[in-house]
Amino acid sequence: LRLSVSKTDALTCIRKTIEDCSFSIIQKHIRMEQRCDVPSIPMWVDEDKLDKIVSNLLSNALKFTPSGEGFISIDIAQIPSSEAMALFPNLESEADSPYLMVRVFNSGSNIPEDKLDYIFGRYTQLEEGARLGGTGVGLYYTSQLIKFHHGRIKAENCEDSSCPGSKGVAFTFILPINENLYSNEEKHSAGKQ
């Protein structure tokens, strides 16, 4: 697995992925909210891998959000390294680079607290015969794609601020906005596609 990074607008890429998932959201009668307070987030990223990251997180949110009464929110932001370090205390910040931050929240059942640290492991499933099937590789694969981009991901049980009383799970990931983290080979391979 290799990265092919290029300078692109991450916000446009993420919004396209959300739009591609909108039919499933509508079909399950789930309310969805998308929030972003900037017009664009230019950065070096592998667009295909970013699409897979967001698609996997949305697919997971859809799987565990109750039909008809569920809620999914997606927050997208460009944050300073100080905020990234507050979200991920063990983060070694890259020269005060800003970060792309994406948070996908879904209402529904929580993840048992003792399982939160293990859900990104390969073949990890929280319950036998998880709803809608699954092999337990989606979150592992997602976490690996984020690591290739020098990012971090975490899951937490919480409430969504825009929907008081809406308990569920939030997956938050960050990717540094720093061209210097990628090798020339990773940049050159993007031009050869």
Image (tube, helix red, strand yellow):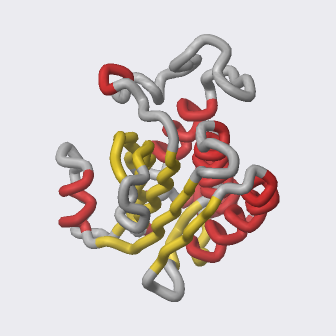
Residue 90 at x, y percent in the picture: 19, 43
Work out which quarter of the rendered image holds the N terminus and state it. top right
Residue 57 at x, y percent in the picture: 58, 46
* Residue drawn at 18 percent across, 47 percent down: 89
Q: 188 and 62: which one is in front?
A: 62
The vertical placement of 2 against 165, above or below, is: above
Q: Quadrant of residue 110?
A: top left
How many callouts does the rendering have? 0
* Residue drawn at 39 percent across, 74 percent down: 78
Q: Is residue 141 visible?
A: yes
The vertical placement of 168 against 5, above or below, is: above
27 left or right, relative to 177: right
Residue 168 at x, y percent in the picture: 44, 44
* Residue drawn at 66 percent across, 56 percent down: 30
Q: Quadrant of residue 93?
A: bottom left
Q: 19 and 129: which one is in front?
A: 129
* Residue drawn at 34 percent across, 47 percent down: 158
Q: Is residue 2 visible?
A: no
Seen from this angle, which residue lies furthest bottom?
39
Seen from this angle, which residue lies furthest top?
128
The vertical placement of 11 against 21, above or below, is: below
Work out which quarter of the rendered image holds the C terminus and state it. bottom right
The vertical placement of 138 against 25, above or below, is: above
